[in-house]
Each structure stands twice: as structure tokens, then as C-alpha cells.
Amino acid sequence: MSVNLKAKPFYLSDEDIAWVESTLASLSETEKIQQLFCTSSMGNLDDQLADFKRLGFKPGGTLFRKSSAKELREKVEKIQNYSKVPMLIAADLDRGAWNLIEEGTCNGHHMQIAATGDPELSYKAGLLCARECTATGVNWDFGPVTDIDYNPYSPIVNVRSFGDQPEMVAEFTSRYCQGLKDGGMLACAKHWPGDGRDLRDQHFVASVNDLSVEEWDATYGMIYGRLIDEGCPTVMTAHIMQPAYSRYYNPDIKDEEIMVGSLNYDLHNKLLRGKLGFNGLIVTDASSMVGFIERVPRSKAVPLSIANGADMFLFNRDLEEDYEFMLKGYEDGVITPERLDEAVTRILAAKAMLKLHEKAKAGALVPPVEALEIFNDPAGKAQGREISDKGITLVRNDENVLPFDCEKVKNIYVIVIGDQPGYHNHACGYGKIFVEELEKRGFNVILYDPENPDVPFNIGRAKIADVKKQVDVICYFANVQTSGGDSAARISWPGVRGTLPTLIMDIPTIMVSIDNPYLATDAPGFKTMVNAYTSEDNNVKMLVGKLCGETTFKGVSPIDPFKGKFTKVN
């Protein structure tokens, strides 16, 4: 399959094309295979570079995790100086630069942006994310998430999606991609062929998009089609099966022969490149996930991912071993010379889009230290606050408890649910911030203590009349998210049922969630519910201000918190 370097998304000049072609010609077969790899630089970079040197290995790209802006810039500079060909430097930026850079702006999860109802805030979020990240030399966002959040029990999509309405997801994703582009960064639509249908997580199992061909075309296909038409440069192919399309292209295929997207020739070449016309770069999702190897042994899956249409291979279980698997696949003809050249051409074309060859020649692959001044610009933090202000959503206020009437509400009993380090946010302790903000405003907060549940009284066993004398409002503060090792994100009531909302009909009781927006499916009886979508300090502070009436609730839920389930208080 040929690559049109003058067509979208590349639109390369003759000079750019000359660089791509000359660079490809200058690489040995081994060096071309190394370009296929996008490694993970999460540990000690010096140790990693030592391994690279030992293996004679210079990858096409790498991904970094969170650090200070100064430290990240130094790491990027060091690994770029090591590389023969300028590298793609990637990051997962679901909540903006804050995901990667300690000083970066938190734009809120995609769902919080969608809750503002303003697609231009999505554009601004992408633009600011790109500007802050490129100041450190990072040039590739593994985002935005283009999945549709159909399944409330999906632990991996959830607030990372722009919602459960395809048209809204398409619009907000489109504007985010444009923001990234205008900020000088590659966007990467994920997770092909579409997550959000299955309640399972591809980290643990090969998951399934169960839509029919017609349903997929009208939803996920519509979104990917729009992004491709608008020039989205890269797509992340995931460990997700799409049985309807596999059977469409192969009517006699057996269930056990259906491959996940990252290994699926038809989904890559007939659907993504053929029907949808995608000419850009395809990168696999993390190959360390279980979903990647449920159908094929790793030794075969590694080269098969490239042979069947992916251009770049993300992460490793063991770099040396995976490199050997890829080399062996090429030697055995699994990856043909033509397929290798096609993949590397797309990798080089993506680099040329970013003018990395020109920047390398000018010694400007990493901006000067002065570029880090962007993190001192108050406009970034102001934008984060605007998204919080416009996104936090009052889902239900049937008892008119909110905003708190200071004449009636003095004593608030707070029960914190979850609030442990999560996979996408290793920080915790947001319940403490929540309590402190209430106390700053003069409320008397009685905090449930799982170590001393009887102090000052046991909320699960005390007489209702006695509780009413001491409590005006019961507030459940929830930060429920997956830790990365669990396969669900659901309420786990503290105190082994000792904190169940048994007083919900006797004392005004509210639920506020700063992450998972679907707690109403586990606890539909709450008459007052707030979704804040993002676990982050300033978002919690903004939330408390709204509870107290300092600002109004402006957000509109981009999902059905109840997912159509019956509840007597609907």
C-alpha cells in the first residue's frame, strides 16, 4: 500500500519529501526496524540509554511520564541527542499538560470539557496543552480519546470520553485535535476500532465493540471519518475486537479467529485505510496489555502487528526480547521489505509534519529554557478554572438542599468514598481538601473515621433522632476510579456497610463525585447529586464554592448518569 506524502494528513513539501526519502534510503534494515518502536521512558533515563547502547538500538519514539518541566526538558534533550533520526516524543495527556508536567495546566477530563457545552473550550484546551508540552520538546499527544462512553461500567473509558452522544464526541474531539495542531503537536485519535461498549478493560482482556456494521458506521465510524477528513495525523489501534466488521470482510471466519484491532489486517487496511481513507500513521496501544496476546503468542504478535497494518509498536514487555521478535518476524518474511518501508515512511512523514528535520538541523529540537516561562502565565490556570466553573454539573437537586443555606446548614457529616491513588492520577487526599474548604467557610464538619466509627456516633446504628440533633446534611464525597489493577470502578461503601445511605429519607443527603459520573447507577436514591468529573485540587475547591452558592452550577451532563435505569426518584 503506497503512502501519499502530499495528501492529507501529511501535506509535505518537496523538500520534506526529499528528507523522508533520503533518510529512509540511509537506514539499514535493522535501523528501519528500530524506527518501528515507541518505547516507554518511565524509569531512569540514563539506565535506559545504557540499554539502548548495549543493544545498538535507536527507537523512532518514546513516551515520558510526569515530572517537572525543567526535568522533562532535560530528558527530552538527552534522548534526542542520542538519536540518529529525530524522535517522536509522546505523552498521555487526557487532562492536559498537567498529566505530564507538574507545573502544567489541568484542563479537566474530556467529559468535564464536554459538560461545559462549549466546543471552543475543547479547542482552547488542546491548544494550551500543545503549547505547554511543546515548550519541553514533547510533540505527540496520545489523544484525544475518541471513544463513546456507552457502558457506565467501563473502568477505562468513563470520564476520559467526551460523553455518550456520538455527535457531541465528534464535535469536541474535532475541536481538540485542531487545538493540538495549531499548538504544533500531533494528535492521535484512540482507541480504534472504538472503546466504550464493553464493561471490560483491554489491559486485562481482549475487549469487544459489539455494534453491527450499520451501528458502527453511524457512531464510531462517523467520528473517525470526520477526524480523518479534517486531517488527524495518527490513530492508536487498540486490543479491541469488532466482530461485525470482521465477519463482514470474512463471512466464514470463526469466533476464535477474530483478531483485536491492533492485530487485525482487515480493520487496518480495508476499514481504516480503505473505507475511511486514512493515510496517516497507525500506532498500536500499549503492547504490555493482556488484550494484545490473547489470540497469538507474543513472539508472533509483535511482528504481526506491523505486518497487519500498524506502523509503530508501542511499549515493550522486555525491550531486548521484543526487538528479537520483530527482527525474527522480518527475517521470516512475516514483515515484508515493502511493509517495513511503508511503515517507516509514515513514521518519517509524521516527523516531517512537525519539521523535526529542520529543527534538528537548527539545533532546536528542544526549545530554549526560556520557553518554560509559559508555566508562569496565569492565563493557563485561568483557563483551567473556567473549565471547572462551566463543567461541574448539578445532576439532581430534588430537595433544594443546594446551595447550602448558612442559616439552616451548620453541621455536615462527611463520608469519603475511595479517594485512593488511581491509574490516571496517582495523587489522592481530595477528601481532606474538600473538608478544609468547608471548614474555611465556617461549617462544622464531622468526618467519618473508619478507624473510629463510633466517634462521635456510629452513623449506621445511631438513633435517627440523635443524629438529627447533630447533623444538618450528610455528604458522601466520592473519588471512585480504577487503580489500574482492578477491573471495575464502583462504589465500595466504607465500614463494611456501616456507611450505607440508610438515612436518605430522614436527613438531607447528597452525593458529590469528583471522578466517576455514574455513581447514580449504584446509588440512585440520592435526591441531590453533583458530578465534578476530575480529581484535582482546584476543581475540588471550585466544587465547594458551588455547593455554598458562591458561583452557580453551569455544567450540563454529557452522559445519562442513570443510563436509562429505573429509579423511583427520577
Image (spheres, rainbow, N blue to C red):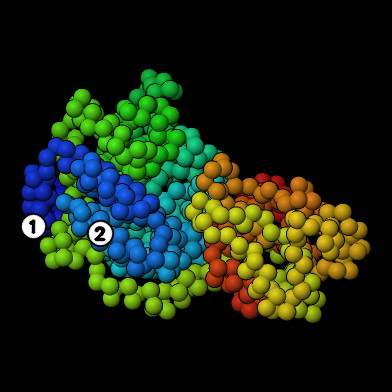
Instruction: Report x, y in % for residue 269.
Output: 27, 36
Instruction: Report x, y in % for residue 142.
Output: 36, 52
In which quarter of the view is residue 341 placed?
top left
Q: Which residue is mark 2?
A: 78
In which quarter of the view is residue 531 placed?
bottom right
**Badge 1 amino acid:** Glu
Q: In this orientation, does residue 307 appear?
A: no
Q: Quadrant of the C terminus?
A: bottom right
SS class, disc 2: helix
**Badge 2 amino acid:** Lys
Question: Could you classify mark 2 by the number of other residues whose Cα lies within 10 Å: few (under 14), some (14-19), or many (20 or more)?
Answer: some
Q: Which residue is mark 1?
A: 15
Q: Is residue 2 above or below residue 416?
A: above
Instruction: Report x, y in % for residue 325.
Output: 28, 31
The image's mark for residue 175 is none
Give 88 or 194, whichever is nearer the viewer.
88
SS class, disc 1: helix
Q: Is residue 479 above or below residue 552?
A: above
